[in-house]
Amino acid sequence: MAPPAKPGIGEIPWEDNGVKIGIPHEVGDRADPEQQHTPLAQARIDLAAIRANTARLHDAAGAAEVMAVVKADGYGHGMVPCARAALAGGATWIGVARLHEALALRAAGIDSRILAWLLSPGDDWISAIASGIDLSAGATWAVEAAARAADTAGRPALLHLKIDTGLGRGGASCAHWPEVLDAAARAEASGHVRVVGVWSHLTDADSPGHPESDKQLETFREAVALARKAGLRPEVVHLANSAATLTLPQTHFDLVRPGLAVFGLSPIPGSAGPTALGLRPAMTLTARLASVKRVPAGHGVSYGHRYRTSRETTLGLVPLGYGDGIPRHASGTGPVLAAGRWRTVAGTVCMDQFVLDLCDDTAAVGDEVVLFGPGDRGEPGAEDWARAAGTLSYEIVTRIGARVPRTYTDGSSQTER
């Protein structure tokens, strides 16, 4: 049985910006000079994995080009470095949701084709058009806004017309599709617009064999035929997301748009994990124990005492919480690799921290714990956290907050953001 921790051991002062300013060192601590400069927590991003995942998706896409979707700061992995890695892996397009994301990519020197699709009237359409960014339009107002901005920018807007084939989200309904085509044809005739794409989004591609995918595919083919009948000649027709890229070759057309799979997570977790799909998770989320102490049986843990120790035990404090994106819904269920074993969160996840019951296993302040990663050391994956929190792996990685520094690895080199 490990001896009781000394009073005061395990307190780690930090500045607000996450830069460590010192760890108290006492006899019995295992903190060493190397750990003095190690972040309290970090998300390590494997850019080589992103390149390899993109190459795998490129192979799956056949003759279609690959648009790597890096919206929401690259699903939490870092938009710019991940876009560069995906392009190095064979992507020829980059996709984002919002215009400011596209403009940031251009400012960072990304010169590939970039599509932004979630636009509002107040966005900087003129700068986007001047920067050669492709834009989505799923309504007549959007076509007209693009044409007006193009007149000011002095170059045509590159438009991808979006049809709602059943998702009920963005895009023109089938009933309004003809009027969008008419508006686009007029704008193209005026020289203000080039219709370079027609696209849509699948609802149930993550459920292979779902009949809705076939219905949407038929609707999409009809919409493309109507666009061509209206005199439009799109360069790229695109429908497939990550799941469809890997499982529905009939949806590939000219371009596929994988997002989650670029980062090595399975878009069909109910059917196959990353390894089975030839993917490798790119993010490993780790932290270092900020406190280790012995407590007696019956000791309450965290807010509400939703967990009580069943015997004398060691508690370890992990300095990550819902303020960093750790889901509070995973209280009592979130898995962590610590002191050589899988553990689950003991009690409630707090804003900045959560607790682990380490039993009688040896642990010390500064020891690394792994929340999720590719599984090389037997650690949980993001999908394990998704199951624990009742959500998707998309949300688990995307919600990891900005105060968790990203460290980029690529072979032997390493950089931080």
Image: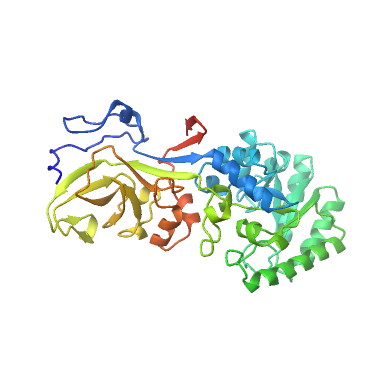
Task: Answer with the quarter of the image where residue 386 lies.
Answer: bottom left
Q: In the displayed structure, would residue 199 be above or below residue 358?
A: below
Give percent across and percent down for residue 118. 62, 54
Asked if 326 appears above or below 272 in the picture, the reply is above
Residue 123 visible in this rendered orientation of the protein: no
Identified at 81% across, 48% down, the residue is 192
Indicate the position of residue 163 as horizontal and vertical percent values. 71, 63
x and y, in percent, of residue 269 in the image: 51, 61
Is residue 403 found left or right of 35 in the rendered image? right
Picture mark count:
0
Residue at figure coordinates x 14%, y 50% from the top left: 295
Task: Look at 55% across and 39% down and name the residue there.
Answer: 48
Nearer the observer, 365 or 177: 365
Question: Which color scheme does this rendered protein use?
Answer: rainbow
Nearer to me, 111 or 53: 53
Residue 232 percent location from the top left of the image: 84, 57
Q: Would you identify the image quadrant in which residue 268 lies?
A: bottom right
User: In the picture provided, is 304 more to the left or to the right than 209?
Assistant: left
Taking the image as drawn, is residue 277 in sight? yes
